[in-house]
Amino acid sequence: MPGILRKYPLAPRSCIALAVFVIFALPRHGHGAVSPAETRGEYLFHVAGCAGCHTSVEPKGELLSGGRRLDTPFGAFYPPNITPDPQYGIGGWSYEDFSRAMLEGKGPDGIIYFPAFPYPSYTGMAEADLRDLWAFLKTVPVVAEAAPGHDLNFPFNIRALVWPWRWLYFEAGEKPVDTTRSAQWNRGAYLVRAVSHCGECHTPRNFLGGSDNERELAGNPNGPDGKRIPDITPDPENGIGAWSTGDIKSYLEMGILPDGDFAGGAMVEVIENSTSKMTPEDREAVAIFLKSLPASGSL
């Protein structure tokens, strides 16, 4: 500031102060100042792990342009482009279209989505969070690229069969707060069950792909890409019963196991792109919720 005053000795100090404020207050990116909704939405975007499914890894694709192959017992799913491209993405959608997709599993044209898209979990998300997530998604760079279509085995490629599946296994709507539990526990339950949709991988499923919610998070021998997904209940033998709350928090933040080893497999990506970006408070809430679950061996 003294240098500026020496260079422009006649300039009113108030004007110089205003100029300095403008220089440092101006946004440093192209689309303008980041709104609070976009900031909150970006956080939810990471916690929900949207990029993990909607961005191709091999070959490496553009963010949220779709095309990542997800192998399941029913065939291969290819998540779609969800950038704001009006033709290949969701650029032509309204917020109501987005909300319907997330909460009801239905597209703007009325099509019902296969439950490989985890709307059975997202249906529990709060509207305020959905609006924030939508605000952020509209800021993602446009990618004018179509994702491949699904490659499913017969008869699972018949979309009409999703209707009886929904009747059996899908319950729409935000889950009520458990008033017998703390706010921290309820936050953890919301993150695990809805936003992060941990049960989509960690809860066992039957031959029709329906979740066995009586054994919530007890592990899944036939997870995505044919990999076994571990038990994360407090079961002392099969799960994480020997882990402390601190152990869980360290694992979610840095991938460090209680024995000093590090996470492997698909969790490396989940930790790097999602749980490590949670606030410490949210990681603690998740840990508290997980420690409260019934042990899988007791069911």
Image (cartoon, rainbow, N blue to C red):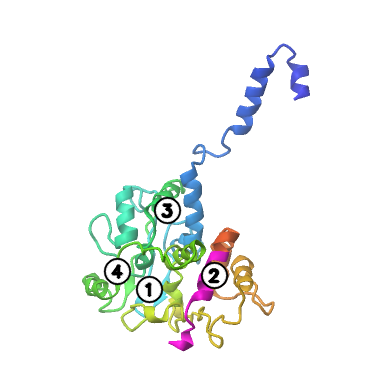
- Residue type for callout 1: Ala
The boundaries of the magenta stretch are 284-299
Residue 275, quarter of the rendered image: bottom right
Eye-nearest disc, 1 or 2: 2
Q: How crowded is mark 1: few (under 14 residues within 10 Å), some or many (20 or more)?
A: some
Q: Farthest residue in the top direction?
A: 10
Report the residue at 63% width, 71% height from top.
246
Along the horizontal axis of the image, is 263 left or right of 47?
Answer: right
Q: Are marks 2 and 3 in contact (CB under 8 Å)?
A: no
Disc 2 secondary structure class: helix
Location of residue 44 with respect to 241 vertically, above or below? above
Residue at image mark 4: 171
Magenta stretch prevailing secondary structure: helix
Eye-nearest disc, 1 or 4: 4
Eye-nearest disc, 4 or 2: 2
- Residue type for callout 2: Ile
Q: Which mark is residue 297?
A: none
Disc 1 secondary structure class: strand
Residue at image mark 3: 129
Please state which of residues 223 and 41 is positioned toward the viewer in this rendering: 41
Q: Position of residue 53 (x, y in %)?
A: 45, 65
Residue at image mark 2: 288
Task: Report the quarter where the N terminus lies.
Answer: top right
If you read the primary sequence from the N terminus, does the residue marked by circle 2 or circle 3 appear first? 3
If you read the primary sequence from the N terminus, does the residue marked by circle 3 or circle 1 appear first? 1
Q: Where is residue 87 in the image (x, y as percent from the top left)?
A: 33, 50
Location of residue 85 with respect to 119 vertically, above or below? above
Q: Where is residue 148 in the image (x, y as percent from the top left)?
A: 36, 64
Q: How crowded is mark 3: few (under 14 residues within 10 Å), some or many (20 or more)?
A: some
